[in-house]
């Protein structure tokens, strides 16, 4: 499944806001938000100066074959 988040990234590259656009059950949305908040990005820039920017990000969760088979 996919959790889609809208992230606001500040001029220092840190995530300053997280909005859930599409979530998943079983704590997966919360885990995606947690990981997003810990992320660090290269800030967007305009005229060579860093700016605050918003970006949509997908966090993909998948089961491997062993987990899907219950092993």
Image (cartoon, rainbow, N blue to C red):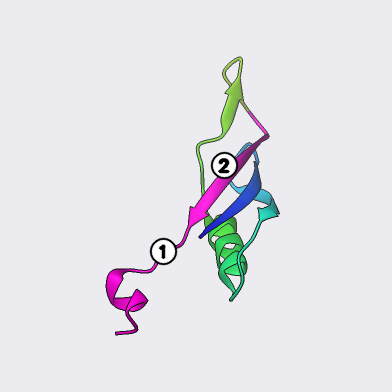
Q: From the top left corner, tell me how far across and down residue 10 is, in percent.
A: 65, 40
Residue at the spot x=29%, y=85% of the render?
Answer: 71
Q: Residue sitting at 38 percent across and 69 percent down? A: 63
Residue 48 location in percent, x, y? 57, 18
Badge 1 or badge 2: first in the primary sequence: 2
The x and y percentages for residue 66 are 28, 76
User: Residue 67 lies in magenta, yes or no?
Assistant: yes
**Residue positioned 69% across, 55% down in the render:** 20
Q: Any mark on residue 10, and which? A: none
**Badge nearest the viewer, 1 or 2:** 1
Q: What element carries label 1?
A: loop
Q: Give the residue number, with chain letter if any, for mark 2.
A: 13
| Start-end of magenta stretch | 51-71
Residue 52, percent from left and from top: 68, 34
Specify the label residue 62 is tagged with. Answer: 1
Residue 41 to residue 59: above or below: above
Q: Is residue 12 magenta?
A: no
Q: Is 34 located above or below residue 8 in the figure?
A: below
């Amino acid at each position: 499944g996919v959790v889609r988040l809208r992230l606001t990234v500040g001029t220092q590259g840190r995530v300053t806001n997280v909005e859930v656009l599409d979530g998943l059950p079983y704590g997966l949305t919360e885990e995606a938000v947690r990981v997003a908040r810990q992320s660090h990005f290269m800030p967007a820039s305009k005229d060579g100066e860093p700016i605050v920017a918003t970006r949509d990000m997908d966090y993909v969760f998948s089961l491997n074959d062993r987990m899907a088979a219950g092993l």
